[in-house]
Image: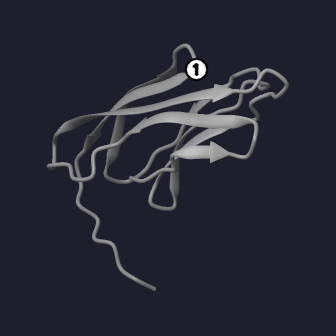
């Protein structure tokens, strides 16, 4: 799992991004993305990926703003938004080797 830390243009500032670099199989991990949206801006979406597979999205303008997607090897126990902070717990239960293209 990877992410971006820093400014996403002049409108969104990612202040803290916590994702473990290495995870043992069957271990619960905590994920955290603390961000701030500038006063003149509106957040369109916030998405999380494992590799190239999206496993979570938050789009505040939708009737159902939170969506969780199934990704092999990742079980989302709890994901949610709390005071401009996406927090979650996931369990890694499958090892998928990465290959270069």
- 62 or 1, nearer to the observer: 1
In this image, 88 relative to 82: left or right? left
Can you identify the residue that label 1 sits on? 84
**Percent from the top left, x then y, of residue 84?**
58, 20
The relative height of residue 101 versus residue 26 in the rendered view (above or below) is below
Question: Between 4 and 86, which is closer to the camera in this rendering?
Answer: 4
Quarter of the image where one finds residue 10:
top right
Residue depicted at 14% across the width and 49% down the height = 24
Other residues around mark 1 within 10 Å, as few (<14) / some (14–19) / many (≥20): few
Q: Nearer the viewer, residue 24 or 93?
A: 24
Where is residue 34 shown, x and y percent of the image?
50, 28
Q: Could you tell me how many numbered marks the image carries?
A: 1
> Residue placed farthest to the bottom in the image?
101
Depth check: give the residue in front, 77 or 43: 43
Q: Position of residue 100 (x, y in %)?
A: 40, 83
Q: Residue at x 16, y 43 (%)?
A: 26
Q: Is residue 33 above or below residue 22?
A: above
Question: In the shown orientation, is residue 25 left or right of residue 10?
Answer: left
Residue 51, by quadrant, is bottom left
Q: Residue furthest top?
A: 83
Find residue 81 and report its horizontal and vertical position in percent: 54, 20
Colour setting: one colour
Q: Is residue 55 left or right of residue 63?
A: left
Q: Which residue is located at x 43 percent, y 50 percent? A: 71
- Residue at the image position 50 percent from the left and 56 percent from the top: 53
The quadrant in which residue 20 appears is: top left
Q: Is residue 74 above or below residue 68?
A: below
Extreme residue toward the right, this view: 40
Q: Secondary structure at mark 1?
A: loop
């Amino acid at each position: 799992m990877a992410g971006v830390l820093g400014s996403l243009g002049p409108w969104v500032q990612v202040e803290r991004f916590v994702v473990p670099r290495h995870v043992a199989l069957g271990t619960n991990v905590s994920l955290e993305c603390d961000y701030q949206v500038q006063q003149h801006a509106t957040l369109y979406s916030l998405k999380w990926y494992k590799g190239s597979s999206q496993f979570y999205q938050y789009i505040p303008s939708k009737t159902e703003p939170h969506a969780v997607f199934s990704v092999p090897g990742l079980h989302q126990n709890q994901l949610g938004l709390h005071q401009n902070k996406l927090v979650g717990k996931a369990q890694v239960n499958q090892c998928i080797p990465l290959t270069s293209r």
